[in-house]
Amino acid sequence: SGYYEGLPAIGRAVGKSPRTIQRWINQHGLPACKLPNGNWFITDGLIDSWILARNHIMIEQKKAKTPVFNQSCTGASTK
């Protein structure tokens, strides 16, 4: 549809519960806007951009946690 108004509608768009959407907004920076009527509003483009950015961050974090092979620890005797 292109845009979604309300946590239930946003949740249906991404296959998550309204509670999860609220948590993503509050804790993970989902870029939804609160309208004067109190409903949350977001577009497909914002959802897609946020998901891509989160995936990039998660990949970079995994790379940073990957142990680097230390050549001094090859198991060979140093005698």
Image (cartoon, rainbow, N blue to C red):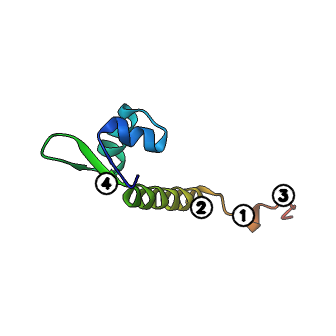
Q: Judging from the image, what secondary structure is the residue with disc 2 in?
A: helix
Which residue is under mark 1? 69
- Mark 2 or mark 3, which has the lower sequence index? 2
- Distance, label 2 to label 3, CA atoms, is 24 Å
Q: Is residue 49 left or right of residue 4?
A: right
Q: Nearer the viewer, residue 13 or 51?
A: 13
Q: Are marks 1 and 3 in contact (CB under 8 Å)?
A: no
- Labelled disc at residue 63: 2
- Labelled disc at residue 75: 3
Locate residue 38, reporting x and y percent.
17, 40
Q: Residues within 10 Å of mark 1 (few under 14, many from 20)?
A: few
4 or 3: mark nearer the eye = 4
Residue type at mark 1 is: Phe
- Mark 1 or mark 3, which has the lower sequence index? 1
1 or 3: mark nearer the eye = 1
Q: Judging from the image, what secondary structure is the residue with disc 4 in?
A: loop
Most distant residue in the bottom direction: 71
2 or 1: mark nearer the eye = 2
Which residue is under mark 4? 31
Residue type at mark 4 is: Pro
2 or 3: mark nearer the eye = 2
Q: Judging from the image, what secondary structure is the residue with disc 3 in?
A: loop
